[in-house]
């Protein structure tokens, strides 16, 4: 019984090794020469493993190498595939093919993420972890079998099977629209500042733009059209927003400073009533004589029916006068006789 347990214990590493070889063959299309490169490519730094010399043992160095190899391989393929296309188109296509999102999806679809060793976390939906592992795998292929094997792997195991290169190349990703949407959602001011315009050796115009958000300088982009230059500047600025928290903090601090200045009044609004007091001389209204009372009464009655009376003309300025002390008085018998005598004397 114990002999069979020992045999099973000895067979277990071989079984795991065989399973790893088999799984890698399904992904690569060939068997590894040196399995250790691939084993390291599948070690995420979170497991904290170290070698005999105490140095960290993970896939970060292979990721660095694979990133450079991928740029060369995909750049070569795109260059050969789209003869006559300008640099901007080729750069944009390569960028989409080797982006973390694309490589992360490839790692999931090919089953690479399931082989990745990490500290007990699921990486099936983490495009960065999966994408990094894919780059590390390419680095392992390069060290194990060379550049041609990397090219074969991409052409025969990736293109056509998992990626339609034409669909990727001609799919327009509107980075400018995405950046504008982000700025509007966060209510920040954004502009595209033109830096310069020049001509290349063939006389074709080249434009350079820079994204500026709340006065904070973003990334720059150059292209053979304004749209291309702004697209490249927008794309790199979006990446900066995603990767540099200090850039985001600077933008929102500038926004906060601007809105505070806009909300604070620059001067006190003058009081129109107080301003009038400086130049209006108030007149004391004298009590009318008894002889003038009839004329005053008549004019006040007519003012109710005439738009041309002095009272009507001054009605627009009623706020300048206090009319609350003006009251109607009953005529006495003596006043009526006096008015009659004055009228008779005037007719004589």
Image (cartoon, rainbow, N blue to C red):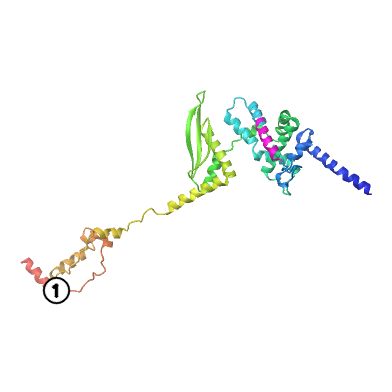
Relative depth, front residue between 207 and 3: 3
Q: Is residue 65 magenta?
A: yes
Question: Viewed as shown, does residue 319 lie left or right of 292?
Answer: right
Instruction: Measuring from the top left, give residue 4's x and y in whole percent.
Output: 92, 46
Q: Residue at x 91, y 47 (%)?
A: 5
Please give the range of residues in magenta: 59-72
What residue is at 53 percent from the left and 35 percent from the top?
Answer: 221
| 316 vs 207, nearest the viewer | 207
Specify the farthest residue to the bottom.
333
The stretch drawn in magenta includes residue 71: yes
Q: Position of residue 329 (x, y in %)?
A: 21, 73
Q: Main secondary structure of the magenta part?
A: helix
Q: Is residue 256 above or below residue 91?
A: below
Which one is nearer the viewer's eye here, 318 or 90? 90
Q: Which residue bears the numbered disc 1?
A: 335
In the rendered image, the residue lying farthest to the left is: 348
Q: Tell me: 236 left or right of 114.
A: left
């Amino acid at each position: 019984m114990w002999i069979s347990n020992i045999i099973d214990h000895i067979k277990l590493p071989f079984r795991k090794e065989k399973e790893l070889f088999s799984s890698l063959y399904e992904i690569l299309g060939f068997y590894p020469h040196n399995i250790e490169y691939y084993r390291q490519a599948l070690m995420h730094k979170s497991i904290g493993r170290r070698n005999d010399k105490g140095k960290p043992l993970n896939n970060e160095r292979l990721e660095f190498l694979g990133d450079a190899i991928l740029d060369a391989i995909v750049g070569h393929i795109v260059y050969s595939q789209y003869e006559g296309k300008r640099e901007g188109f080729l750069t944009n296509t390569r960028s989409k093919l080797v982006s973390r999102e694309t490589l992360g999806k490839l790692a999931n679809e090919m089953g690479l993420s399931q082989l990745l060793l990490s500290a007990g976390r699921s990486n099936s939906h983490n495009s960065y972890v999966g994408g990094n592992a894919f780059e590390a795998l390419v680095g392992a292929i390069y060290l194990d079998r060379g550049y041609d094997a990397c090219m074969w792997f991409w052409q025969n195991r990736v293109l056509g099977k998992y990626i339609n290169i034409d669909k990727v190349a001609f799919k327009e990703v509107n980075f400018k629209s995405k950046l504008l949407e982000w700025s509007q959602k966060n209510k920040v001011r954004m502009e595209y500042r033109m830096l310069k315009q020049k001509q290349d050796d063939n006389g074709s115009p080249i434009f350079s733009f820079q994204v500026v958000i709340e006065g904070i300088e973003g990334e720059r982009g150059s292209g053979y059209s304004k749209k291309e230059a702004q697209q490249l500047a927008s794309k790199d600025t979006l990446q900066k927003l995603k990767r540099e928290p200090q850039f985001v903090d600077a933008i929102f601090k500038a926004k906060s400073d601007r809105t505070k200045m806009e909300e604070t009044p620059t001067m006190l609004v003058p009081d129109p009533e107080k301003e009038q007091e400086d130049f209006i001389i108030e007149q004391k209204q004298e009590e009318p004589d008894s002889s003038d009372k009839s004329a005053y009464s008549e004019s006040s009655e007519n003012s109710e029916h005439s738009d041309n009376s002095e009272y009507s003309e001054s009605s627009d300025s009623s706020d300048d006068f206090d009319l609350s002390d003006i009251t109607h008085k009953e005529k006495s018998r003596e006043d009526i006789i006096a008015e009659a005598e004055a009228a008779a004397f005037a007719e004589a």
